[in-house]
Image (cartoon, rainbow, N blue to C red):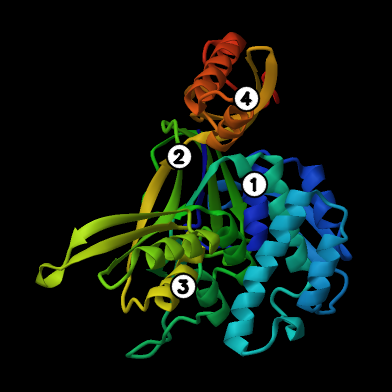
Amino acid sequence: MKAVVFNPFSGLSGDMIVASLLDIGANKKLVKDAMTSVGDVDVQISKANKLGISATKVKVKSNNDQVTSYKKIIKMIKESGLGDSVIEDSVSIYERISDAESKVYETPKDRLRSQDVGGFDAIADVIGACAAFHNLGLDKCEIYSTPICRWEWFENTTRGGPPITSPIIMEIIRNSCLNTKYRTGPVAQETINTTGVAILAHFINECNVFFPKIQIKRVGYGEGGKHPEIQNLLRTVIGETDEKLISDRIDVLEVIVDDITGNALGNLIQELMSSGAKDVAVTPANIKKGRPGYMIRVMAHPADTNRLIKKMVQEKGSLSTMVMPVKRLITNRQIIPTMINIGRNRREVNVKIATDTRGSILNISAEFEDCKKVAVELGVSVKEVIRMAECVAWSRLSGIEKKTYSCESKKRLD
């Protein structure tokens, strides 16, 4: 499976992300056209050499010094005529920024006007990064980042002085899986900006100190254009992993209860599932003082964790919940309509195809509710309908390519 690693070892900004993706092979004309589609900006793309390392440099100059409100920025992006995926990601990035600024400044989002990210040059950086990202097909990859390196400097005093840290940047990092580290050096200004941090926070799946185990295919460098005394560069790496399954991150929530009836427990499961839980499991348990109880285990996307904990408190009155972030391996899954013959009757049921990242079929299972409906209608057993649907799917798909299947190979198995 393809993997992308952003390595901000010496700064991070929106134009550095765009430049590194161009250096790695994104279409320059496509990206430049996207960046100039919203607002009056000039975009210059050139090669540079930063203290011995060859890199790509992107310089964006706005011909309009006006600072735009978030409401207008979102409207401009949605009306830009760009691809749906580019628009969706660009809007999400600005929503992430506006959430952080709204909290820090205690100002409603529709009244925000930021000098840092409300200019047309910042808008161009966000759109350019999204356009380059999708042009390279990185939306189908696992996206990683190493910690964002920030330079720490000290005044010429005995005790020194603290680094200047943007509260907006810290708020964005707090609400993402990004983390940072500091280096001491001869830098008297911030080496990261809000736009760059927000773009990275939106795209990455995981942030680790060490590179994931990958076979490196391409490497690109984006120059920051500032701080001549350091290698102000962002490195982006594209490679292949050995993993045949897709990995993602979820939270496992656990709570132990002893004063709940069966009806209330069933209702709690339904409420949690309707509130966004990926799955809920209940296990009998012996708890304190030898009393019988239940352990409720909930799988949740990290963004849904707080809401689901609140729901458990409301429904059950739980005073504490254990939260464990875990890595999960999952298969690619595709639902395919499959035609089966039962006697003289021809019916359609959906079959779920599970494959690894290389297209090898791992499992085929018929959708139970579809099979049940056919079984009731024709007066046969559900087991027979399931067996027939899965046998038909296996035989048809094996005929396509020896148990190797692409979701685009066939939309229906007739």
Q: Residue furthest left?
A: 289
Which residue is more in the foreground, 40 or 213? 213
Please say whether residue 58 is visible from this viewpoint. no
- Label drawn at residue 330: 2
Type of residue at label 4?
Answer: Leu
**Label 4, label 2: how far apart the Cα atoms are:** 35 Å
Mark 3 or 4: the one toward you:
4
Q: Residues within 10 Å of mark 4 (few under 14, many from 20)?
A: few
Where is mark 3, residue-wise? 311
Coordinates of residue 316 in the picture (x, y in percent): 38, 74
Coordinates of residue 113 in the picture (x, y in percent): 75, 83
User: Residue 147 lies in what quarter of the image?
Assistant: bottom left
Please say whether residue 30 is visible from this viewpoint. yes
Q: Residues within 10 Å of mark 3 (few under 14, many from 20)?
A: some
Where is mark 1, residue-wise? 21
Mark 4 or 2: the one toward you:
4
**Label 3, label 1: how far apart the Cα atoms are:** 42 Å
Q: Is residue 290 above or below residue 155?
A: above
Please report whichever mark, 3 or 2, sits nearer to the chain's N-terminal start: 3
Please report whichever mark, 4 or 2, sits nearer to the chain's N-terminal start: 2
Where is mark 4, residue-wise? 378
Q: Give the residue displayed 66% in from the left and 76% down from the top.
A: 98
**Label 3, label 2: how far apart the Cα atoms are:** 27 Å
User: Residue 202 lies in what quarter of the image?
Assistant: bottom right
